[in-house]
Image: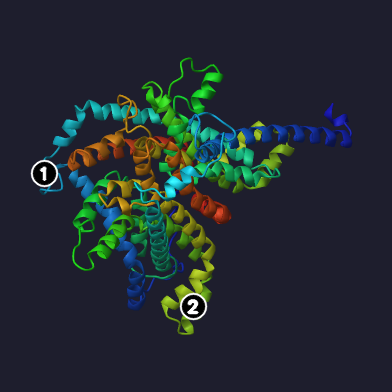
Amino acid sequence: MTAQLSAAQMKRRRQTRTRLLNTLAYAVLIVIALITLYPFYWTFITSLESTGNIYDAKLLPANLSPRNYAAVFTGTTVPFWRMAVNSIVICTAGVSLTVLLASLAAYPLAKMRFPGQNALFVAILTLMVLPNEAGLIVNYITTVKLGLLQIHSGPLGAALNMISQYAAIVLPSLASIVGLFLIRQAYMGVPTELIEAARIDGAKELTIWRRVMLPLALPTIVAFAILEFVAFWNSFLWARILPIDEEMLPLSAGLLNLSGQFSTNSRAVMAGAVLTVLPILVVFMFGQRYFMRGLEGAVKG
Amino acid sequence: MGSKPAAPPATQEGTRPRFSVRTTLLAYAFLLPFLLLLGLYHTWPVLFGTYLAFTDYNIISPPRFVGLHNFQLLLHDNQFWSGVVNSLKYLLVVPVLQLLSIGLALLVNRPLPGIGFFRTAYYVPVVTSFAVVGLIWTWMYQQDGPVTFLLQHLGLMKNPHSLLNDPGSALYAVMFVTLWKGIGYYMVLYLAGLQGIPKDHEEAAMIDGASRWQVFWHITLPALRPTVLVCSLLSTISAIKVFEEIYVMTQGGPVGSTYTALFFTYSRAFQDFRYGYAAAAGLVIAVISLIFGAVNFRLTRGGRSDA
């Protein structure tokens, strides 16, 4: 039967079928997009309202007022600006050091020959698979034992306190096994002749790393940096478990304090939530391509 | 993140590797800062944590070795076991999450105009912190909030109440949030897997008259098996170890209905300061997740791709 249909008929049939399928696909895509985005949208419009039934399901804000944002910005109970600065410091230090450490360590693993290379690689791999349930507990103990939570006094006390508390927050996440693998993978793609040529020209290894490896692995490094930015910006548990000064908390962790202290004004907390998500969304929009590629690389191996 | 197969180092085949002292020193110099931190914050917790499980420790006085005592206590600790049961219930998220994200990946793999927008939209929950996500859903679940509104209008809820305040539904309400946050992540991983499948196999089968479903079942899915292994392994392990959602949304309540195994560990360590006991519980959870990891490995036939 089908064999008797003319080519034109077949084509038309297929077109109708495709169009129907596409319409169906769009319908499903839109419904799921609504489910993933509506909670954010709802929080946003509710944070813009000053009065009304706060938790109501709605599509548009009942009234518009900057009051909740003003409450967050001028908040006397929660040091919003201070927390934002903390987040920026933690992210900047965290991301740059993580990328630096991983991109340094990946170089010999990818492009040098030395005894223990294989064993080290396998050991690091095993660490990734090994369950690390006590990680939080032992890292907490380590942080205490390292004296990072001690109160310093003296003329430099305040500055030392700040530095050691930032260090307490950042240090446990600096050695990223995933980052090491991603960047090693990128280095493997760099032609060995290029490195040999540089060595013959008398370049030092550090120069080769900086002038040859880093530029050629840049796409992977950027992708990894974006992943790490998101991770550092979003992390809250570790910082909240540490008994540090409240004004040292990053935004994500501070937001939960905000929710405790503003329990009578959930709208202000919503405004805080919106402000916490915003930088991530901006970074995500800009880095989306790299970001997805970074993830794909992680699964393809 | 997926684990990677260990690639052999760049040695030439057949030649015995000759190491230069200079290169060796340099290599370790490059590795040193990373290895120091790795040892301190990754290796040490595994070793010391295992040791702590056999001790009584409160940070102030040195750990006191107590043998299997902590494990004997755990065996009779009802709170721990109800935590384990809740963690096992949480595993229900895994198959649902995997099926939905495979479906979604297939959907967004179609070359439709504007598909980039949808991929991004599904990824927004993934890049948002659990602190924010937990708060948003706590508000959404309020008695007079959108979820209750929706359920009432669908005729699924008679007397309006917050799903999080109801011991019968709280765990499932939190599980939904995990699902909602995770789906975009696994979608991207599956998408990567799908795009790695050579097109000619599928096309050849189509020309031979196979239906779309047959192609998916006999060609696409087997080729996707390594990705399925990675994804189901990741989501199984994170389901057993679920913590942050619960920490933000319910703190284990109401009446212990969302008290999971890892929440038990957290409470013992950071509320009771019984670090040894908490470490023992952590070790048991680790063993449980290893077992489920192995089950996963078997079910996906070791992630071997047939394509």
Q: Label 2 to label 1, Cα distance in Å?
A: 55 Å
Q: Are the residues under marks 2 and 1 on the same chain?
A: no
Which amino acid type corresponds to the residue marked 1 in the rendered image?
Phe
Look at the numbered discs 2 and 1 and tell me whether their residues touch, using CB distance below 8 Å.
no
Give x and y (percent) for residue B124. 53, 44
Which quadrant would the N terminus of chain A be assigned to in this image? top right
Which amino acid type corresponds to the residue marked 2 in the rendered image?
Glu
Please tell me the numbered disc located at residue B252.
none
Q: Residues within 10 Å of mark 1 (few under 14, many from 20)?
A: some
The chain containing the residue under callout 2 comes to A
Figure quadrant of residue B27: bottom left
Write down the residue under mark 1.
B65
Q: Secondary structure at mark 1?
A: strand
- How many marks are shown on the rendered structure? 2
Is residue B180 at least partly visible in the picture?
yes
Q: Secondary structure at mark 2?
A: helix
**Residue plotted at (72% across, 36% down):** A22
Give x and y (percent) for residue A162. 29, 60
Q: Residues within 10 Å of mark 2 (few under 14, many from 20)?
A: few
Farthest residue to the bottom: give it.
A201
Horizontally, is A253 left or right of B281 in the view?
A: right
Horizontally, is B118 left or right of A228 in the view?
A: right
Vertical placement of residue A38 versus B197, above or below:
above
Write down the residue under mark 2.
A196
**Residue plotted at (49% across, 65% down):** A188
Horizontally, is B99 left or right of B242 in the view?
A: right
Give x and y (percent) for residue B41. 29, 55
Give x and y (percent) for residue B127. 49, 47
Farthest residue to the top: give it.
B158
**Residue plotted at (38% across, 22% down):** B166
